[in-house]
Amino acid sequence: MSQKPPADLFTPSRRQLLVGTAALSATAMLAPQALAQAFPTAKVNTTGLAVTDTEVTVGILHSVTGTMAISETGSVQAEKLAIEQINAGGGVLGRKIKFIQEDGASDWPTFAEKAKKLLVNDKVASVMGCWTSASRKAVLPVFEQYNGMLYYPTFYEGLEQSKNVIYTGQEATQQIIAGLDWVAKEKGAKTFYLLGSDYIWPRTSNKIARKHIENHLKTKVVGEEYFPLGHTQFNSVINKIKLTKPDVIYAIIVGGSNVAFYKQLKAAGIDLKKQTLLTISVTEDEIDGIGGENIVGAYACMKYFQSLDNPNNKAFVTAFKKMWGEKTVIGDVTQAAYLGPWLWKLTVEKAGSFDIDKIAAASPDVEFKGAPEGYVKIHANHHLWSKTRVGRARADGQYDMIYETASLVEPDPFPKGYQ
Amino acid sequence: MFGDYSLADLGSILVMQGFAGLILFSVFVLMALGLAIIFGQMGVINMAHGEFMILGAYMTFLTSHVFQNYFQAYYAGYFFVAMLVAFIVSGALGLIVEWGLIRFLYARPLDTLLATWGLSLIMQQAFRSIFGAREVGVELPQWMMGSLPVTDTIEVQINGLFVMGLTLIITGIIALLLYRSRWGLQVRAVVTNRTMSGAVGIDTRRVDRLTFGLGCGIAGVAGSAFTMIGSTGPTAGQLYIVDTFLVVVFGGAQSLLGTIFSALTISQSQSTLEFFLTGSMAKVLTLLIVIGLLMLRPQGLFVLKVRR
């Protein structure tokens, strides 16, 4: 697998090199070997990471077995693609990236154990991994104790910030507020029915949504409900929705429940072309399982859709499909996972070092112009500045983007007035 | 919460809610039938029951593709073929599993628990390797989607009706088989007294194998039907298994009637409570009711009276 990545993907790295340090400007154009010599291993790696003169080892830590394999597969694919493209372009500071992949097996203690193995035994320079908040919470103490660096791809509930983690997905306010503002303005929505699976992310997100709906939009929540993970019978709540006739159904249902929910919604005669439904949990990946015909017309609030029309994304989608097959779809989190290796590379080059402390310090303001979602930048709080977008589901399982915020939305993991 | 609604609104909601409960009831019966036969008649706890259901669901997925590509003209009716395929494949796998695994473990019920759990893990990973880790979407023919409007406010879901009809038919067939056929007689004899049945010339091994195969086959049909309302993925079987065991244990393991009544109790309390409370609280209360009743009647709702 050695297809040449599109040229525009390299602009940021080259630019970063030029801007990063004046001393670098002459070496940026040199061959990888020469570049590696310009950065002797003894200088760029003072803490004993797995960095040699020719190679640097990173870890990939996701579930490829168990329940979460459904969701995490796309992230693994995206990370491998990014690593391959970076290698094809000369690697990081002249060193090829080698990766060690570990399986978290959808089990949180296993994630912690494997994280420890990657950091302590393999001395990896960074880890791309985790998906659920539970797995991230399980590995966080390990990364903080052994001073590792984690690039975490999933949109999540916020309320966390660590020197040892870069959050490449959206925290809750980035995903929720712009979407609610849009639906209130465009659809004139006055009443909302909040639904969610019963765990931390949907509950925290709905809490933020409710505060925004009641305190800022001055509109009304007419119902709020949670279902155990894996719940498959939604007829009762669908009846309640029919009774309360909300302007907007706000759904944060995850996993297998999603499929049951949308199929039953359709069977019950609720036509999403007429009834506004806004979700923050259904990406193109999930639609694959739900079936496009069951969810057509629904609105999703994300930062990335596969159908985004920009040169970066076109190149990304082409490369992704070439590597993983024509039929694969790319959802929001997959794109965020793709950002991980690139942001790490750019940060290493800005810091001129692989040392974790230096990377952590250099991360704020690192920008990646080759991102499929468009320009992104790391905030001082280690989350990303990114745009929020609303898309409408088509019958073929893709989204049509119909709204995006005019500027990048600032990440705010500890939002005041929303807790 | 009812203050704002007219009497007509409330009436139609009551009807729809009753219908929702009936659908849930049919789903529970369909899930539990296969397990009830295996658990009740053979004493084998089949932890891989959910995976046999998902095998049926995947067969439906494959059949729909075959029809889309080769028999486009008959697509509207593919679901019936799919259910048959699901029954045959799941049933055949059931026969093989009984022959290769279960028959060595009849005297060790706890080991069957462990062995079938292992089997469920193997099947999950096999699905993942063959069909991919992601869920697959099973398309339905147009006539099975949507709902029939009865009045302005009452709508009846077609796939709900379909599941109800299917449950009725399968339950009828099983009841006939168990209580009117020679095989049923043999099964009941073996359940009552295995040694004695063997002594009078019943091939107990053969009865066991057929029973297990039939149970798995029904699981396959159930899985096929559930593609209409649920997800099809490698681990989706796990979504059903807890509810299934709940229904079977609560009903009293050896009684078909018990299974039906237990499904009725659980589904009605679940769907009624869900309407007044939230989904999670409804589940909690339903489980509390079941635990309470099981404390009063440890053998389940219906107990087969056998002289030991």
Image (tube, grey):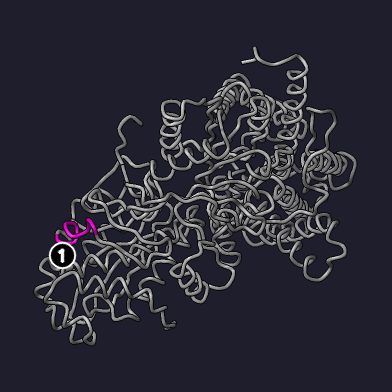
Q: Is residue B300 visible?
A: no
| Residue at image mark 1 | A355
Specify the subunit that label 1 lies on: A
Q: Is residue B155 magenta?
A: no
Boundaries of the magenta span: A358-365
Query: Residue A124's x, y, as percent?
Result: 24, 66
- A363 is within the stretch colored magenta: yes
> Which quarter of the picture shows residue B85?
bottom right
Report helix, strand or loop for mark 1.
loop
Amino acid type shown at disc 1: Asp
Percent position of residue B102, x then y: 63, 55
Magenta: main secondary structure equals: helix
Q: Nearer the viewer, residue A78 or B277?
A: A78
Is residue A352 at least partly visible in the picture? yes
- Residue B154: percent from the left, percent from the top? 79, 28
Residue placed at 23% from the left, 87% from the top?
A31
- Percent across and percent down for residue A261 are 63, 41
Is A323 situated left or right of A121 in this image? right
